[in-house]
Amino acid sequence: MWRKSTYSGPDGNCVEVAFLTDGNVAVRDTKDRRGPALAFAPGEWDTFLTELSAGGFRRS
């Protein structure tokens, strides 16, 4: 089941996340739902969220 953030705007341009039965996490672009999705192992996803929360992806 794909989910998107409640912060997504009405235009629908955002990413969706799916928690897969094997424990991995998939991410896709809502503008191309039939296009490719990225899959991450649980540890990779946790690291991504930690860095995101810490501001690790801010533009300099």
Image (cartoon, grey):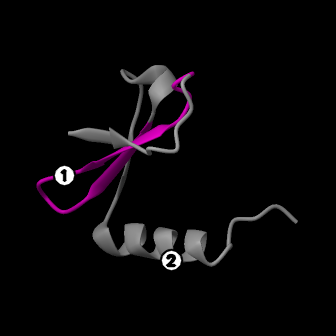
Q: Which residues are magenta?
A: 11-28
- Where does residue 32 sit, x and y in percent of width and height? 46, 22
Work out whether residue 31 or residue 37 is closer to the camera in this orientation and state it.
Answer: 31
Q: Which residue is painted at 48% across and 69% down in the image?
A: 49
> Would you say 54 lies left or right of 15 here?
right
Tag 2 residue: 50
> Would you say 58 lies left or right of 37 here?
right
Q: Is residue 9 above or below residue 4?
A: above
The three-letter amino acid code for the residue at tag 1 is Leu
- Where does residue 10 sit, x and y in percent of width and height? 54, 25
Secondary structure at badge 1 equals loop
Work out whether residue 41 or residue 7 is closer to the camera in this orientation and state it.
Answer: 7
- Where does residue 4 sit, x and y in percent of width and height? 40, 41
Q: Residues within 10 Å of mark 2 (few under 14, many from 20)?
A: few
Q: Is residue 26 magenta?
A: yes
Q: Which residue is painted at 51% across and 25% down in the image?
A: 12
Q: Nearer the viewer, mark 2 or mark 1?
A: 2
Q: Which residue is painted at 25% across and 59% down in the image?
A: 24
Q: Is residue 49 above or below residue 36?
A: below
Q: Which mark is residue 36?
A: none
Secondary structure at badge 2 equals helix
Q: CA distance from mark 2 to mark 1?
A: 20 Å
Instruction: Place residue 40 in its image quadrant.
Output: bottom left
Total marks shown come to 2
Q: Which residue is painted at 57% across and 21% down in the image?
A: 11
> Would you say 20 lies left or right of 42 here?
left
Tag 1 residue: 20
The three-letter amino acid code for the residue at tag 2 is Thr
- Where does residue 25 sit, x and y in percent of width and height? 30, 55
